[in-house]
Structure formats: C-alpha cells, structure tokens
Image (cartoon, grey):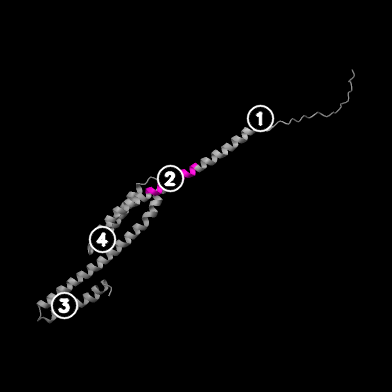
C-alpha cells in the first residue's frame, strides 16, 4: 500500500481588523465611573479632614472650659493660702500644693479625649507653676516674719527683765548679750540686713 504524497502549501491567513469604538463596549461609562470614584474619594478625604478639624476645635474648647473651672477653684485655694500668716503659711504649704494637684487632676480626668487632655495640660501647667512659685514665696516671707517676730518678742522679754532688775549687773550684761545675739543672728538675716 502506497502512501500518497502531497506536498504542503503555505498561504497567508487573512487578518481582519475591525475598527470598533471603545464606547461600543462601555469605555465612556467606565471612564466616567472612574472619574466619579476619584471625585467621591477626594470628597470623602476632605470630609474626614474637616471632621477631624472640627473635633480638634471641640477638644480645645473642652480643655479651655475645664481650665477656666480649674482656675476658679484654684483661685479660692490661693486666696485662702495667702491669708495665712507666719508659721501657719509655712506649715500649710504642702497641703496647698497637694490641693492644687488634686484640683488640676480632677478637671483633667473629666476630659473625654487624649487630645483635650494635652490641650488642658498646655493651658494649666504654666498657671500651676506660677501659683506654686507664688505660694512658696509667700510661705518663705511669712516664715521670715515669724522668725523675726519671735526674736523681737525675746528682745522685749529681756528688756523687761533688765527694766525690772535695774540693780543687777549680771541681768543687764546677759540681757544685752541676748539682745545683740537676737539682732545680729536672727532679725538682721531674717530682714535681709
């Protein structure tokens, strides 16, 4: 049996190019939807940024309101402390400072967000520092007054003792030494002389 022999021939396959517009398959709609998504995305970002900015404004307002309430309460504490005189002011200083801390913490803890708390800290720290410095200055001045007043009272006692014992030279001598010691050792340093 014989195999027929046929030779292969090569001929070009015709190519067809159709010029079909993109719009026929929804290209215009796709571009429009893409643009719409871009606009919606940008709008959403802008809305989010505005919402964040509004929240920051609210946090700041809450912090200022809390700081104002704290100022009112600490003003009363400060007035009460500044009315103390002598040794009482020095002894009351630690309690006063703890009171300032407690009032500050009370209003800070009442704020709802960390951002409001940071703003409150910014507002309140300087004022609390000034109140602390003022109270320490007042207490130191009152302590100096107390020390000088006590020394002046001892001098008055010695003067009375000398006056009541005019014929006793030892009372005069010890009295004058005590008076000089009080003036040089206590009153002059307390009054900055």
- Which of 20 and 129 lies nearest the eye of the viewer? 20
* Label 3 or label 1, whichever comes before in sequence order: 1
Residue furthest to the top in view is 1
- Residue behind mark 3: 175
- Residue behind mark 1: 25
Which range of residues does the magenta coloring cover? Answer: 47-62
Q: Is residue 14 above or below residue 130?
A: above
Local crowd size for mark 1, using a 10 Å CA cut-off: few (<14), some (14–19), many (≥20): few
Q: CA distance from mark 1 to mark 2?
A: 46 Å
Q: CA distance from mark 4 to mark 2?
A: 40 Å
> Foreground mark, 2 or 3?
2
* Label 2 or label 3, whichever comes before in sequence order: 2
Residue plotted at (57% across, 39% down): 38
Q: Position of residue 55 (x, y in %)?
A: 43, 45
Q: CA distance from mark 3 to mark 1?
A: 119 Å
* Label 1 or label 2, whichever comes before in sequence order: 1
* Label 4 or label 3, whichever comes before in sequence order: 4
Residue plotted at (59% across, 38% down): 35
- Residue behind mark 2: 55
Local crowd size for mark 3, using a 10 Å CA cut-off: few (<14), some (14–19), many (≥20): some
Image quarter for residue 133? bottom left
Q: Secondary structure at mark 3?
A: helix
Q: Is residue 7 left or right of residue 92?
A: right
Residue 82's tag is: 4
Residue plotted at (20% across, 69% down): 149
Q: CA distance from mark 1 to mark 4?
A: 86 Å
């Amino acid at each position: 049996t014989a195999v027929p022999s046929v030779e292969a021939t090569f001929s070009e396959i015709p190519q067809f190019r159709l010029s079909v517009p993109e719009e026929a398959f929804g290209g215009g709609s796709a571009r429009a939807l893409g643009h719409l998504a871009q606009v919606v995305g940008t709008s959403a970002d802008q809305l989010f940024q505005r919402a964040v900015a509004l929240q920051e404004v609210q946090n700041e307002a809450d912090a200022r309101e809390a700081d104002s309430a704290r100022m009112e309460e600490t003003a009363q504490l400060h007035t009460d402390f500044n009315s103390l005189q002598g040794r009482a002011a020095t002894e009351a200083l630690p309690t006063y400072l703890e009171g300032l801390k407690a009032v500050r913490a009370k209003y800070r803890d009442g704020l709802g967000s960390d951002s409001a708390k940071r703003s409150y800290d910014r507002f309140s720290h300087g004022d609390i520092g000034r109140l602390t410095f003022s109270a320490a200055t007042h207490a130191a001045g009152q302590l100096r007054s107390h020390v000088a007043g006590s020394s002046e009272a001892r001098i008055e006692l010695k003067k009375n003792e000398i006056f009541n014992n005019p014929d006793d030279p030892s009372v005069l001598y010890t009295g004058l030494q005590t008076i000089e010691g009080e003036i040089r050792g206590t009153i002059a340093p307390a009054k900055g002389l």
